[in-house]
Amino acid sequence: MDTTVFPIQMGIDTVYAIRGEGVILIDGGSPHQIGRLKEGLAKAAIKPKEIRLIVLTHGHWDHIGSVKDVKDLTGAKVLLHQRDMHRLDEVHPSQPPGLTPWGKVLIALLKIYSRFIRIPAFEVDIVAGDQEISLAEYGIPGKVIPTPGHSWGSVSVLLDSGEAFVGDLAMNQLPMRRAPGLPIFGDDMQAVKDSWRKLLDMGAKTVFPGHGKPFQVGELAKTRSL
């Protein structure tokens, strides 16, 4: 089964519409970005109601900020890992620890900014656990895979063809990184590396990060970080 990937910029995040026999969406974008999603779907010739599932790679504010609006628009189910469900109850979005010197600086700035962020409440329809979830029933040849590290509830979508949609398990955009690399902030760097080894063993070839342009997985090897 062939698939087509449509990147859509929603604030500082890139979300991905994936069309196979059905359509799913990866992540929900930054807050107040529903207009950009509508524009992106129109360019991709995707009707909102075609989207049957929204896979949240993790629960940080910039990946769930517009989920309520997206769900209202599409009627799609929402999937989030159980270890990130607590983030939906936060009055002010929490920030992960910095994993690099620049990551610590950036997180300190984001903590100031996040005081003014409010995430509209939404319902999670599928609470993922630590088992893989097939996407076959949604018309997509691939699966949702637990890949903790950036957050303990991070997941990735790996298509049978090797495209890996990893959220913030990798970054490829300023002000985070100048070039492809591992996250500069997260819950546990060793867990990040372990998750990447799992994805590599499962055949990941092309990486689609939540921040920045896609790249070949070999770019990570160049950084000597895995």
Image (tube, rainbow, N blue to C red):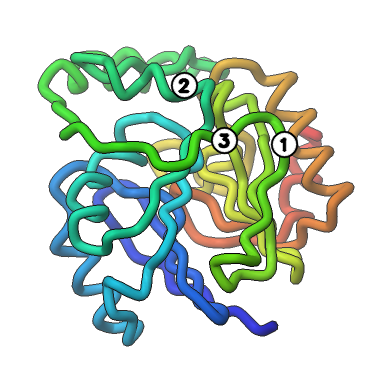
Residue 203, above or below 93? below
For residue 103, the mark is 2
Query: Circle 3 — which element?
Result: strand
Residue located beneath label 3 in the image: 128
Residue located beneath label 1 in the image: 131
Answer with mark 3 or mark 2, whichever residue precedes in sequence. 2
Residue 158, above or below 92? below
Q: Nearer the viewer, mark 2 or mark 1?
A: 1
Please report contact status of discs 3 and 1: CB closer than 8 Å, yes or no: yes
User: Percent x, y for residue 218?
Assistant: 78, 55
Residue found 80% across the figure and 45% down from its top: 221
Q: Amino acid at mark 3?
A: Ala
Q: Nearer the viewer, mark 3 or mark 2?
A: 3
Q: Amino acid at mark 1?
A: Gln
Q: Amino acid at mark 2?
A: Gly
Please report contact status of discs 3 and 2: CB closer than 8 Å, yes or no: no
Give the distance between the C-alpha atoms of the residues marked 3 and 2, in whole angstroms: 28 Å
